[in-house]
Structure formats: C-alpha cells, structure tokens
Image (spheres, rainbow, N blue to C red):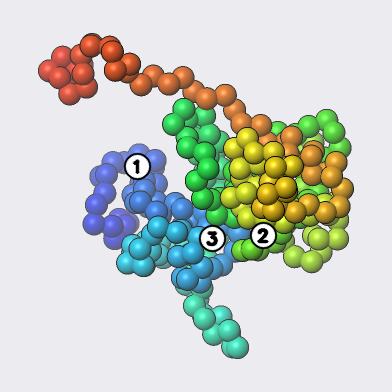
C-alpha cells in the first residue's frame, strides 16, 4: 500500500519508505512533541515556534493518514480536539533519540537556540551517561509542565504525575532553554540562579549529580574546505566525473 504523499522515493528499501512517512520538514518534530502525551493544535503551535498553521495542519493530516498520529475529541467539559501518537508512532522515540545523539557530534551544532520541553527531555535521554555517584531524582518544574527525571546506573527515566513527585530529592524551576544552557551550553547553575533565570530547592548535591550526568560527546572533525584551498570545487566537471 502506497502512502498518499504526493512525492515518494519509489525505492524498495524500508529506510526510503520511512523517509516517505516522516521525511517531510517538521514531520519528525511533530512526533517529538507528542512523545510525552497528547497535545492540542495550539499547544503544538507553541512548541514548534516557527511552523505556520497551514504546514502544521498538512503534517498532522499526513501523519494521521499514515497511521502515526490519531486525532480524537476529549469528553466534556474539555470537549477539545487533541492529537496523539498511535502505538506504532510512539516507537519512533528510539529513532529520534539516536538521531539526536548522532547530531550532537556535529561541528555545526549551534548552541543557545530555543528548545521545547520535549526536545530537552529527549536530549537528556540521548546524552545520559551513568555516574558512580548514587544517581539523582530531580523534579523539573517548567512553565509548560512538570516532570521527574531519575538517573541510576541502570539508566535514565522520565516520569509524570503526583506519585513521581514523592521521590524527588531536589526541584529545578526554570525554562527548558535555561536548563539546556546549563546542561549543554556552558552556563553554570550558579550564574543562572544569580540571574534569576533558575531556582533550585532541596538537595543541591542531587542537582549537581544531575548536572554531571550529561556530558557532550566530542565533535566530529570539521571537514569544511579551507577558503584558501584552491582545489576542485564541488560541481566542477572533475567532481561530477567521480559519481
């Protein structure tokens, strides 16, 4: 069965078919935002800051047609439409985490850009490296939601709800972008607190153990040609003859 997309790679490889399904611009980021639960159209617009309403509508329609996302109406009194991943769609989480871990080595990865809560949580899942320090259980209290992250020698876990809050050792209050800048952007937690961008309560040692558990990998070699290198340019006859 072919997808209803207007363009296809027409390639029998399942990887090519995966790109037929989720290769359109924004499609995989829509999936990313739904990995931690259903969202309304307006919520997705907020999280995907620069997407237009028309493009978001198109991507949701395509993802729904291909069985990755479903749309349903909440019962009263909410009575609003939400989008959520199907069971099959939710299996993309490992793919997104692996892609993020791979791209973290890019020499062109720009730090300091806005990041959604879902994007940050998945980045933490990708970068988590167990430490011999007893682990941590920290509540991340953010404007767009609260989650509890736990790091142990066995792995990294993300939970939601009141039951998860009972085990927390510390609470970080701030935006996802602030925590991203602390974990991956070189900003110290002390500087963020002093600037009023973050607040930490509870066990500071647990918070510091969290901060040590997400080392960035070394960057891949930057093979961008030196401007002074006058070798054959991409697109010359010599370069094309190699293909």
Q: Which residue is mark 1?
A: 16
Residue at image position (79%, 66%) is 162
Mark whose residue sits in front, 3 or 1? 3
Mark 3 residue crowding within 10 angstroms, few (<14) / some (14–19) / many (20+)? many
In terms of sequence position, does the residue under pointer 3 or pointer 1 come before the other? Answer: 1
Q: On screen, 207 above or below 33?
A: above
Q: Which picture quadrant has residue 188?
A: top right
Residue 64 pos. (x, y %): 41, 65
Judging depth in this view, the residue of 242 and 133 nearest the camera is: 133
Q: On screen, 135 above or below 161?
A: above
Label drawn at residue 100: none
Residue 243 pos. (x, y %): 21, 20
Left or right placement of residue 26 versus residue 172 in this view: left
Mark 1 residue crowding within 10 angstroms, few (<14) / some (14–19) / many (20+)? some
Q: State the count of labels.
A: 3
Residue at image position (53%, 34%) is 104
Q: Which residue is mark 3?
A: 34
Task: Report if residue 219 is visible in the image.
Answer: yes
Q: Which residue is mark 2?
A: 142
Mark whose residue sits in front, 2 or 3? 2
> Please, what secondary structure does the residue beneath circle 3 have?
helix
Q: On screen, 167 above or below 191?
A: below
C-alpha distance separating marks 3 and 1: 23 Å
In terms of sequence position, does the residue under pointer 2 or pointer 3 come before the other? Answer: 3
Q: Quadrant location of the N terminus?
A: bottom left
Task: Report if residue 155 is visible in the image.
Answer: no
Residue 47 pos. (x, y %): 50, 60
> Please, what secondary structure does the residue beneath circle 2 have?
strand
User: Badges 2 and 3: C-beta atoms under 8 Å apart?
Assistant: no
Q: Outermost residue, bottom direction? A: 77
Residue 217 pos. (x, y %): 59, 28
């Amino acid at each position: 069965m072919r997808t209803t997309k207007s363009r296809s790679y027409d390639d029998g490889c399942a990887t090519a078919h995966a790109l037929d399904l989720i290769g359109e611009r924004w499609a995989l980021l829509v999936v990313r935002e739904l990995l931690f639960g259903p969202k309304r159209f307006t919520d997705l617009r907020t999280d995907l800051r620069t997407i237009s309403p028309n493009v978001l509508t198109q991507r949701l329609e395509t993802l729904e047609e291909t069985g990755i996302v479903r749309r349903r109406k909440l019962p009263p009194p909410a009575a609003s439409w939400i989008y959520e991943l199907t069971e099959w769609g939710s299996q993309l989480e490992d793919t997104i985490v692996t892609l993020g871990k791979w791209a973290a080595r890019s020499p062109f990865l720009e730090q300091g850009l806005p990041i959604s809560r879902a994007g940050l949580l998945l980045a933490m899942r990708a970068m988590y490296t167990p430490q011999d320090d007893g682990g941590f259980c920290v509540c991340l209290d953010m404007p767009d939601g609260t989650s509890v992250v736990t790091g142990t020698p066995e792995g990294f876990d993300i939970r939601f709800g009141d039951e998860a809050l009972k085990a927390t050792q510390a609470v970080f209050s701030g935006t996802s972008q602030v925590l991203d800048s602390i974990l991956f952007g070189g900003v110290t937690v002390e500087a963020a607190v002093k600037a009023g961008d973050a607040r930490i309560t509870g066990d500071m040692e647990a918070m510091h153990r969290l901060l040590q558990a997400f080392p960035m990998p070394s960057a891949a070699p930057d093979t961008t040609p030196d401007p002074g290198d006058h070798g054959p340019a991409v697109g010359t006859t010599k370069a094309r003859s190699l293909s």
